[in-house]
Image (cartoon, rainbow, N blue to C red):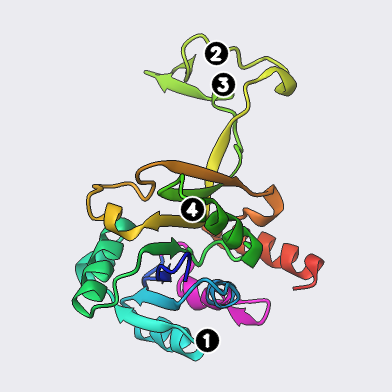
Amino acid sequence: MLNGKRVIAVVPARGGSKSIPGKNIKPLCGKPLLAWSIDIARQVAEIDRVIVSTDDSEIAAVGRNYGADVYDRPAHLATDEALVIDALKDLLSRLESESDAPEWVILLEPTCPLRSADDVRRCLELVAGGQFDSVATFKDADLNPHRAWRLADGIPEVFIPGAVPWLPRQKLPKAYQLNGAVYIFRAALLAEEAKSLLVGRLGAVLMPRERSQDIDDHLDFMIVEALMRESGK
């Protein structure tokens, strides 16, 4: 509970990964990738329930084995083109029909296993203060947008009109990007939103680069595993 209001954590984990077959249950330092997110959620006292949303029976079995509840995701919400927000809306509708609708939802993508329970707690502290309806974690941008280019008919031009990509890093405006580690939002506002998980009044928590790694391919997996071994995980 957070200020007496129910909180659930959702770990979205569909099957059918193209970049790494079976990615969500691939062992990472001796534990399925999915399990790292479940374990973090279970360390946060404010979280009342942890749910894995999946269309895959093997993922479902792993989720249950690590202490999460499992909700089957409809096939049309588990395609490559399907949006996580639509799967969340479906899940929240089902929870409401079961009289278990939460006030807050925490989204923990399984591909960001280096987040800590404290990262989640910092996000919760922001929404607990009452000034935000949603909070997400960010990191320093990998590429400052003032150094980005576009190719128009093969001709390079700066992405932001008037930008000077040759400026020293220290003189560029500070830029950040979502790292995908933690999203928290009011469940009721998500139903009104078409595509964004960031609803209402927005807040941000900055995370360091070393805990912001997102696993998309085999190289990412190797990097994260190396970081975990170095940190003693």
What kind of element bears circle 4?
Answer: helix
Comes first in the chain, label 2 or label 4: 4
Residue pointed to by mark 2: 163
Relative image position of residue 227 (x, y in whole percent)? 74, 62
Which of the labelled discs sits on residue 31, or is there none?
Answer: none
Whichever of labels 3 and 4 marks the residue nearer the N terminus, that label is 4
Cα gap from disc 3 to disc 4, whole angstroms: 32 Å
Can residue 79 be seen?
A: no
Per the model, the C-alpha gap separating discs 1 and 2 is 49 Å
Q: Could you say where residue 30 lies in the image, as x and y percent from the top left? A: 66, 82
Instruction: Tally the numbered discs.
Output: 4
The residue labelled by disc 4 is 127
Q: Find out whether residue 83 is within the magenta segment.
A: no
Identify the mark nearer the N-term, 3 or 1: 1
* Left or right of 144 on screen, residue 108: left
Residue 19 among magenta residues: yes
Label 3's element? helix
Q: Secondary structure at mark 2?
A: loop
Q: Residues within 10 Å of mark 1 (few under 14, many from 20)?
A: some
The mark closer to the camera, 3 or 4, is 4
**Is the residue marked by circle 4 packed among few (<14), some (14-19), or many (20+) residues within 10 Å?**
many
Q: Are marks 3 and 2 in contact (CB under 8 Å)?
A: yes
Q: Earlier in the sequence, mark 1 or mark 2?
A: 1
Instruction: Identify the disc placed on residue 66.
Output: 1
Does label 1 or label 4 sit earlier along the sequence?
1
Dividing the image into 4 quarters, which one contains the C terminus? Answer: bottom right
Q: Which mark is drawn over residue 146?
A: 3
Q: Position of residue 219 (x, y in %)?
A: 62, 58
- Residue type for callout 3: His
Q: Which residues are magenta?
A: 18-36
**Discs 2/4, front:** 4
**How far is the residue under mark 1 from the one under mark 4?**
27 Å
